[in-house]
Amino acid sequence: MTYAFGHSPTAAGRLELLDAVFAETTDALLDRAAPADPRHVLDLGCGPGVTTRRLVERFPTARAVAVDLSPEFVDIAHTRLGGLASVDVADVTSDDLDPGPFDLIATRFLVTHLGDPTAALAQWVRRLAPGGVLLVEETASITSDDPVSAAYLELAGAVLGARAHDMYIGRRFADLVRDADGSLATDAPVAHVDFVEAPLVPTVGEAARLFAMNLTTLRHDPVAVAGWPSTDLEGLHEGLVERSGRADRGPIRWSIGQLALTR
């Protein structure tokens, strides 16, 4: 697994901003689909620990485990969480991942970076306790009337696509868990599948700050270097920074695929 957006302090700051922007949709998913009182919780791809913090604050009596492949992010998460969760460097697709069982496994904006999402989902479901729930959030769509934002989305899609990663994998959740005949593609013990596509309308400034932070890494990717002149990349970054203070909503339309699998 490779993470296109890097593990720098800027990348960590971007994940912190992402958590603030997506707090409402994530909280709505937890309200709707999470177990009422999970005893054992796993945060997959925890990054700098902001998602883990959200889980431990909501479920203070649960034993929380958080994992990420980045030692840099895990160090930040350790500092942020103190003793509130066990935080370790681990590959979320490895057979060596903590076997649980877990009452709740949660992950956000991780599956898009995996080479075999269906296999990963199946592996995680097997780590659920009976009645446990796996919650997954991924982008389903982003559209924009703003030419600078649209140019960024084109570049990001090209970089992720070259890695065989789908930037909008959230729209494919139904296909990832069910074959054409309706049977479970995950070959895992799933009792119930729930999928919704939640709308999100961030401010122009929030989206621009997220995009600009991503671009600090993406602009050095070989796909970006080969396909976009350096002057265009610099101009794109400047355009995003110029928009970073805007509070209006509407030009950026985002939807989030939310998947809940119950064992």
Image (spheres, rainbow, N blue to C red):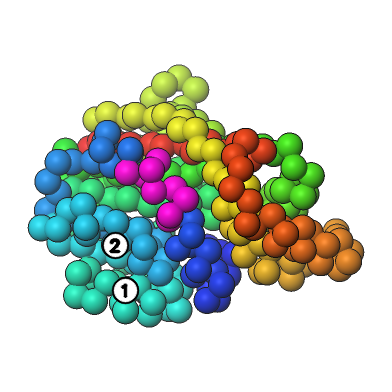
The magenta region covers 19-27
Residue 43 relative to residue 5: left or right? left
Residue 219 position within the rendered picture, expressed as x and y whole percent measured from the top left: 74, 66
Q: Residue 53, labelled with which disc?
A: 2
Residue 106 position within the rendered picture, expressed as x and y whole percent measured from the top left: 32, 50
Residue 23: in magenta span: yes
Crowd rating for badge 1 (residues with CA inside 10 Å; few <14, some 14–19, many 20+): some
Residue 88 relative to residue 118: left or right? left
Residue 244 position within the rendered picture, expressed as x and y whole percent measured from the top left: 64, 58
- Picture quarter with the C terminus: top left
Residue 230 relative to residue 158: left or right? right
Q: Which structural element holds mark 1?
A: helix
Tell me: residue 52, above or below residue 78: above
| Residue 72 seen in the figure | yes
Residue 104 position within the rendered picture, expressed as x and y whole percent measured from the top left: 23, 48
Q: Which structural element holds mark 2?
A: helix
Q: Residue at x 40, y 41 (%)?
A: 25
CB under 8 Å between callouts 1 and 2?
Answer: yes
Q: Residue at x 48, y 56 (%)?
A: 18
**Disc 1 versus disc 2: distance between alpha carbons?**
8 Å
Report how many numbered discs are placed on residues in the image. 2
Q: Residue 103, labelled with which disc?
A: none
Q: Residue at x 43, y 54 (%)?
A: 20
Residue 237: in magenta span: no
Q: Residue 80, labelled with which disc?
A: 1
| Residue 161 seen in the figure | no
